[in-house]
């Protein structure tokens, strides 16, 4: 008997408008990078997130790299960064030959702990070596607590880069995620709330910031009739075809967020009261987009481990995944300084991301929950 089709953690969810915009790009022969869809996508996206300027790029990682370059990051300098995140949040620090310093999470949101951030900035100031920037990640679609974070960074004159790659459609105190700091980045990877198959966006309040980003992202070509370059640039611009997909996706963003939130509420209703299972905490300072619903499992109480549950789901062709391994535990960042660590380490030890795509049906969610709940009994019975 064949298994059902693979249920992915966060599959792309396309509608009807995306293809129309792509057809328009083909009909007008705007295929290569740049074009009217890129310009329109930047303007429409900036309006949605409440930031006046945007630059459409090839990935969220490219956006973060350019943000650090534009902030003047130099080789040997330090950048403070959330530790509980994907490696792309810190990799651009290494691109510039700088050093990441990792800050642990607060238990209330799994995001950067403002108290630990203040402690680290105080220590940096006492050493006479403040970081060039602070990268704050909005984890799994939930905003960090920006008021205290921005206040302490402003006190020391350290700029904040908001990594909202996972948080499009979330809010912080009523304002869209990504509008809190002077600049922010977003990702349109295939597993995000909306996708362009691959792409990202840099948003900023300063028009010169995004203008300079566009210049660097198009190989830093000087204004001349021939190809002339006075600085090193990058091939980081988004294509007009992908921007067309993004424009179509942006129009259904409210529905996609609503679907993810329904997923979370279903999991909360079915799994939230089960002894030994806890959902990722929802912070009181905003509304998450519930990009991924995450749980932690106490094996002593639940009767099975996080890995038991993951394998049980995988045996039924359902993808789940451990939560992010903290960056201070990653081999590539071995030896990096970290402030705290216990909160993110505990979440990683027992945390699991459940299927959370916006195209999931209630029957899909029911099947996932049934398998989760059955895992202790299967384990006790010696079943695979």
Image (spheres, helix red, strand yellow):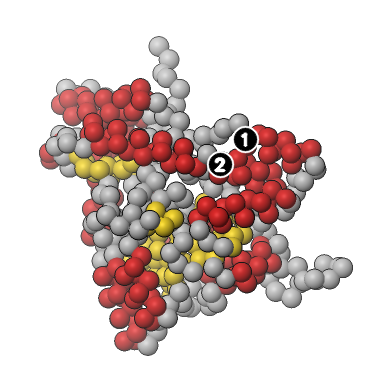
Residue at left offset 45%, top offset 31%: 359
Say above or below: 18 vs 41.
above
Residue at left offset 45%, top offset 67%: 181
Residue 335: quadrant of the picture: bottom left
Drawn side of residue 260 relative to residue 58, left or right: left
User: Of label 1 and label 2, which has the lower sequence position?
Assistant: 1
Residue 124: quadrant of the picture: bottom left
Q: Do the residues labelled 1 and 2 touch (CB within 8 Å)?
A: yes
Residue at left offset 69%, top offset 38%: 22
Say above or below: 268 vs 7.
below
Residue positioned most to the top: 1
Q: Quadrant of the N terminus?
A: top left
Within-10-Å neighbours for mark 2: few <14, some 14–19, many 20+: some
| SS at mark 2 in the image | loop
| SS at mark 1 in the image | helix
Residue 51: where, in percent of width, then height?
53, 61
Residue 229: quadrant of the picture: bottom right
Say above or below: 84 vs 272.
below
Residue 251 numbered tag: 2
Say which of 53 and 70 sits in front.
Answer: 53
Whether residue 312 is visible here, answered yes or no, is no
Q: In which quarter of the image is the C terminus?
A: top left
Drawn side of residue 262 relative to residue 220, left or right: left
Say which of 382 and 63 sits in front.
Answer: 63
Say which of 167 and 119 sits in front.
Answer: 167
Q: Mark 1 points at which residue?
A: 17
Say which of 332 and 357 sits in front.
Answer: 357
Whether residue 168 is visible here, answered yes or no, is yes
């Amino acid at each position: 008997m064949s298994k059902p089709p693979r249920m992915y953690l966060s599959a792309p969810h396309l509608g009807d408008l995306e293809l129309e915009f792509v057809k328009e790009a083909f009909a007008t022969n705007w295929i290569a990078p740049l074009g009217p869809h890129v310009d329109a996508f930047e303007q429409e996206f900036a309006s949605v997130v409440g930031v006046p300027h945007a630059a459409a790029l090839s990935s969220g990682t490219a956006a973060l790299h350019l943000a650090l370059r534009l902030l003047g990051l130099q080789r040997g300098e330090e950048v403070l960064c959330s530790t509980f995140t994907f490696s792309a949040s810190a990799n651009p620090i290494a691109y510039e030959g700088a050093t990441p310093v990792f800050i642990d999470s607060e238990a209330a949101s799994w995001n950067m702990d403002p108290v630990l951030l203040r402690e680290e900035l105080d220590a940096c100031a006492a050493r006479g070596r403040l970081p060039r920037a602070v990268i704050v990640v909005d984890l799994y679609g939930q905003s960090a607590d920006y008021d205290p974070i921005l206040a302490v960074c402003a006190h020391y004159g350290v700029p904040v880069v908001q990594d909202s790659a996972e948080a499009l459609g979330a809010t912080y105190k009523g304002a869209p995620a990504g509008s809190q700091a002077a600049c922010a980045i977003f990702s349109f990877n295939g597993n995000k709330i909306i996708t362009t198959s691959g792409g990202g966006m840099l948003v900023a309040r300063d028009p010169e910031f995004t203008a300079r980003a566009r210049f660097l992202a198009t190989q830093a070509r000087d204004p001349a009739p021939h190809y002339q370059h006075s600085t090193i640039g990058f091939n980081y611009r988004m294509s007009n075809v992908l921007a067309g997909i993004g424009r179509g996706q942006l129009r259904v963003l409210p529905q996609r967020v609503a679907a993810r939130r329904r997923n979370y509420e279903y999991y909360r209703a079915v799994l939230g009261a089960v002894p030994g299972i806890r959902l990722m905490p929802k912070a009181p300072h905003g509304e998450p987009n519930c990009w991924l619903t995450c749980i932690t499992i106490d094996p002593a109480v639940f009767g099975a481990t996080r890995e038991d549950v993951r394998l049980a789901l995988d045996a039924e062709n359902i993808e789940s995944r451990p939560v992010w391994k903290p960056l201070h535990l990653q081999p590539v960042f071995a030896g990096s300084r970290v402030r705290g660590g216990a909160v993110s380490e505990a979440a990683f030890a027992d945390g699991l991301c459940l299927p959370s795509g916006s195209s999931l049906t209630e029957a899909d969610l029911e099947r996932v929950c049934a398998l989760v709940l059955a895992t202790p009994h299967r384990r006790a019975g010696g079943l695979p």
